[in-house]
Image (cartoon, rainbow, N blue to C red):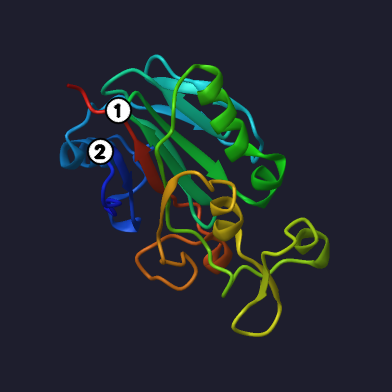
């Protein structure tokens, strides 16, 4: 597990830990390692911008973001190239799944707005492992949606810095960013690399006590 420094309830899984959303044994092992309950709140991810407020574990529905004020309630998303983002405050924890469609739809901003509308404050954000601009080849129509955040892959084609784009939406927060690229790091699943159906999980929770 990757634990961002300075965060109380944030962890990004690797391929080694398995997909805790779908594999009960993996979820139990991850929960034991993190000291959290084995019942999580999760999403049916659709590459959109809907954000839920979670008050209990279980499937929240179709969406790509969730936040909670319930101590000890783990929230999770699963990724294999898309960007997992964890938001944390003294009274709130949130998790966001952002591919290019969700990012341009404003899923991260929607999460921040939903949290603010609930009278809560986010203090820090962690951007987990995702495909990097070194490898995230896109067409011109996608690149045009990310002005200022286009780049080139190591093989010379157009790419996008998706994590950088999301970080730019967090100007008032302390932001930690993983430097691991899912495409090139062998310990992470990458759909772009081998069309895997496997995913690693990101988990956010508000510590009890």
Q: Which residue is mark 2?
A: 8
The answer to which image quadrant residue 138 occupies is bottom right
Q: Residue furthest front?
A: 172
- Relative horizontal placement of residue 130, taking residue 17 as reference (left or right): right
Q: Is residue 67 visible from the viewing direction of this image?
A: yes
Image quadrant containing the C terminus: top left
Q: CA distance from mark 2 to mark 1?
A: 8 Å
Q: Which mark is residue 206?
A: 1
Which element is circle 1 on?
Answer: loop
Q: Is residue 63 visible from the viewing direction of this image?
A: no
Tag 2: Cα neighbours inside 10 Å, few (<14), some, or many (≥20)?
A: some
Counting residues from the N terminus, which is met first, the one under dot 2 or under dot 1?
Answer: 2
Q: Residue furthest right?
A: 141
Vertical placement of 36 versus 138: above or below? above
Q: Nearer the viewer, residue 136 or 67?
A: 67
- Relative horizontal placement of residue 71, taking residue 68 as reference (left or right): left
Instruction: Check contact, mark 2 vs mark 1: CB within 8 A.
Output: yes
In percent of the image, x 20 and y 23: which residue is there? 208
- Relative horizontal placement of residue 72, taking residue 178 as reference (left or right): left
In percent of the image, x 45 and y 44: which residue is there? 173
Tag 1: Cα neighbours inside 10 Å, few (<14), some, or many (≥20)?
A: many
Q: Which mark is residue 11?
A: none
How far from the left and from the top, in percent, is residue 175? 42, 51
How far from the left and from the top, in percent, is residue 11? 31, 45
């Amino acid at each position: 597990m990757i634990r961002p420094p300075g965060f109380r309830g944030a962890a990004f899984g690797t391929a080694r830990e398995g997909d805790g959303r779908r594999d009960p044994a993996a979820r139990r092992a991850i929960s034991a390692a993190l000291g959290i309950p084995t019942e999580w709140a999760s999403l049916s991810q659709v590459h959109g911008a809907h954000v839920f407020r979670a008050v209990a574990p279980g499937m929240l529905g179709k969406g790509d973001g969730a936040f909670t004020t319930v101590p000890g309630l783990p929230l999770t998303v699963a990724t294999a190239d898309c960007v997992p983002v964890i938001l944390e405050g003294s009274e709130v924890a949130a998790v966001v799944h952002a591919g290019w469609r969700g990012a341009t739809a404003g899923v991260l901003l929607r999460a921040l707005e939903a949290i603010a509308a609930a009278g809560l404050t986010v203090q820090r954000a962690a951007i987990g492992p995702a495909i990097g601009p070194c490898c995230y080849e896109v067409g011109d129509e996608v690149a045009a949606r990310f002005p200022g955040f286009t780049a080139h892959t190591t093989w010379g084609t157009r790419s996008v810095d998706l994590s950088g784009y999301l970080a730019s939406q967090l100007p008032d927060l302390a932001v930690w960013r993983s430097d691991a690229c899912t495409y090139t790091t062998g310990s992470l699943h990458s759909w772009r690399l081998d069309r895997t159906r496997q995913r690693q999980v990101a988990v956010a929770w508000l510590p009890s006590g």
